[in-house]
Image (cartoon, helix red, strand yellow):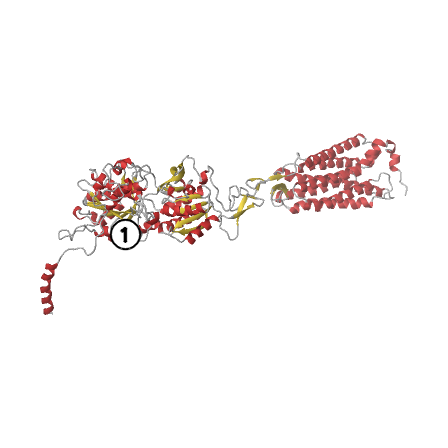
Amino acid sequence: MLLLELLLLISMPIQAEESVCRRLGTALLPELTKEGDFNIGGIFNFRTGQDGQTFTFQSLPAQAKCKTFSYREVQFAFTMIFATEEINKKSNILPNHTLGYKIYNACGFANIIESAIALSNGQRPIINESNCTKADTVHAIIGNSASTPTMGFARIIGRFSIPVISHFATCACLSNRKEFPSFFRTIPSDYYQSRALAQLVKYFGWTWVGAISNKYDYGVNGIATFITAAQEEGVCIEYWETFTSTDSVSSLAQIVHVIKHSTAKVVMAFMSHVEIKVLVDLLHKQNITGLQWIGSDAWITDNTLTESLGYAALIGSVGFTVPRAQIPGLDLFLQEVNPSRFANSIFLKEFWESVFNCSLTPRAGLRTCNGSEHFKNVKTFFTDVSDLRFTNNVYKAVYAVAHALHNLLSCEENKGPFPNATCAKPSNIQQWQVLHYLQTVNFSMEVGETVFFDNKGDSPARYELINLQRATKSTMEVVTIGYYDATHPKDKRFTMNNVNIVWAGGRQKVPVSVCSEHCPPGTRKALQKGKPVCCYDCIPCPQGAISNTTDASDCLKCPMEYWSNQRGDMCIKKEVEFLSYTEIMGMILTICSLLGGFLTTIIFAVFFYYRQTPIVRANNSELSFLLLFSLSLCFLCSLTFIGRPSEWSCMLRHTAFGITFVLCISCVLGKTLVVLMAFRATLPGSDVMKWFGPPQQRLSVFALTLIQVFICVLWLTTSPPFPYKNMNYYQEKIILECHLGSAIGFWAVLGYIGFLASLCFVLAFLARKLPDNFNEAKFITFSMLIFCAVWITFIPAYVSSPGKFTVAVEIFAILASSSGLLVCIFIPKCYVILFRPDENTKKHVMRKTPN
């Protein structure tokens, strides 16, 4: 043990003397750099991939040969430089401190990751003993434009609490704070864009949509969220296909085949401008036109769309993108960019030579730049600031970092956000401290826009709805036609401008894309078996049910007193049916009742005028007058059955009918008994008539009628008739009728009448062959025969007749039976009185008829 300690003591000075600070590998140096008190890193893709491919919105293999310049990415980088220099000139942000930058030109996924690691390691160009142990890590990283590579390095960088602020990575997956704890973005998440696009599809009535995306995180996550949101809005997806620009010819041909044979006329394309250009070129070759494209923000405003052969198919496309902005002074700054300012930038020299078609160093085949070249003299997308959208996100990201640093430096002790209300020491600012202050940053830009991040690092979701319209033969114009603001209530997030929209093919009319035509009001949707919910048949609503909206999923049953109209789109009041005075049947019955009453009055007048004649006196004139009076009441009581039933009319009609008919039958029964007693009185030794004289006749009529009155009073006091809306017999109309109340009371009234009529008929039948002329029993027999026949047939007719016909049957029975009594009993006598006065003599009346 002592020997080991001795060896360690000897070796320590030797190791100290040999300690040399040196880099173990080749440093990956930034393309554009400037040191400051605080440094911000930037990762941009200045070149697109081979054969015109790009990784602005997705990754490419690390070995890809990046050739074509990406003017937009270059503009992003110099906007970052412009923002840092602008902040350094201001006294209200980071006074006495400067911002620096380290911007990497990364091509390919592996190169992007390497650049991010270099920014987190802090590799200096020269490392010696004086700076070997000093950290050179940037305080924040801005980038990348694609979701997939951003996810790659943000997941790594987040473990070191280095803030990553993206201006273009929109994948909703990046909002996961557990996986990406240090990620922020100045562009809204696709979570909101996908829902805004679903609401857009619903707004224009497109319920049958195709969906296509690339195979990267941006496209897959975005289109999946869109499909979910669209289905919540009642939109069906006919197909969902994914591809990349490097897929095989057969794979791309399969996608074209799906689009060609689909019935959806609207296609949601969630991809980059690279894939959409490949897709429309393939569709152009197959002559597939007439599709209405909905674009995601990754391609809908890209200025290179016109480079594709089939770009004309994209005219009329609609989609959401971040709002247009203005950055004062940026245009002049970009025009003043010069390679001499960044002597170590190889890319900027190549970019300059490409734009001006000259060489900064003598080279065969190219003219040498003479120094008069200037960006203000050429027109390129690099200096074009007419439609700043995503460039403004870079500008805001730099300001967000500056404000976080400023708040950190100006923090007062005992008021800080850290434990025990402490602040970070300005001389020892760490990335995790900047990260914390970024989460609470909230400021307004000079143009009035407010910048802040939610608890997931996302910016407020505000979009412009734009429409691609043809400007010239080879250019397209971006026209703003609406807005979407997720900070508003759901029903007020989406608004449209009063701007003419150009649709696919240059049409002015909104295209239709539905699996089934809309079901009009009055019908409902019936799903087709084995197909999505947007494919259905339109089935008319059944009677009594309606649908008053288009594409109703079910028919609504009308309330009890309502019924559906002929179209089935409105509930209307049911027709109320009752026997009215205004209808033909009511009029006829009313006339018959009045005629019956009038005829009875005429006969009464004739009998009264000829009351002293033998026929009138021989037929018990007192009972005859009472019978005529009761018959007139019988005719008139039928009028109470006509008209709208009410509480009083219902009680009156049945009681009046029952009492008047009993009075009538009692009189007939009295006349019958008188005939029988009179015949018995002619027999020797008979004194029957003294027991049935006029007083007894009156008493019998009164007593028999009083019994019916008692039955009616009992009926009215226990359960009287009442008006009732019968909705069971007819579905489409209401029968307004008088409910009997107590059925026992009703049939007791009828039964009592039937009993008296039967008794009268039997007695009259027994006296029908008495030998006197004008034997009244014979006429009473006929009248009772008619009476009983009418009321016997009345019962089944009454029970089976519907609605107002029930009342009509009852009135007819009253009129028929009353008329039978009137005609059979009184008409023969009136005939003799008026037309055969020679027979109206006592001799003739008393003469016996031959056997």
Question: Which of these two is toward me, 225 or 347?
Answer: 347
User: What is the three-letter code of the residue carrying label 1?
Assistant: Asn
Question: Which of these two is toward me, 551 or 661?
Answer: 551
Q: Quadrant of residue 334?
A: top left
Which quarter shows the C terminus? Answer: top right
| Residue extending farthest top | 609
- Name the spot of residue 50 as percent of width and height, x first: 33, 49
- From this viewpoint, is residue 71 visible? yes
Question: Which of these two is toward me, 146 or 422?
Answer: 146
From the image, tell me which residue sits under label 1.
111
Question: Which of these two is toward me, 302 or 359?
Answer: 359
Q: Is residue 103 left or right of residue 286?
A: left
Count of marks, rendered view: 1
| Residue extending farthest front | 364
- From this viewpoint, is residue 177 visible? no
Q: Is residue 651 left or right of residue 281?
A: right
Q: Is residue 337 left or right of residue 235?
A: left
- Name the spot of residue 84 as percent of width and height, x first: 23, 41
Q: Is residue 530 above or below residue 650?
A: below
Q: Is residue 8 above or below residue 496?
A: below
- Name the spot of residue 15 as percent of width and height, x first: 12, 61
Rate crowding at label 1 as few (under 14), some (14 to 19) or many (20 or more) other CA atoms within 10 Å. Answer: many
Q: Quadrant of residue 321?
A: top left
Which quarter shows the N terminus? Answer: bottom left
| Residue extending farthest right | 850
What is the secondary structure assignment of the residue under circle 1? helix
Q: Please tell me which residue is depicted at 40% across the width and 51% down the height of the picture.
A: 243
- Name the spot of residue 365 as percent of width and height, x first: 27, 43
Q: Please tell me which residue is depicted at 10% across the width and 66% down the height of the picture.
A: 7
Q: Please tell me which residue is depicted at 66% across the width and 45% down the height of the picture.
A: 745
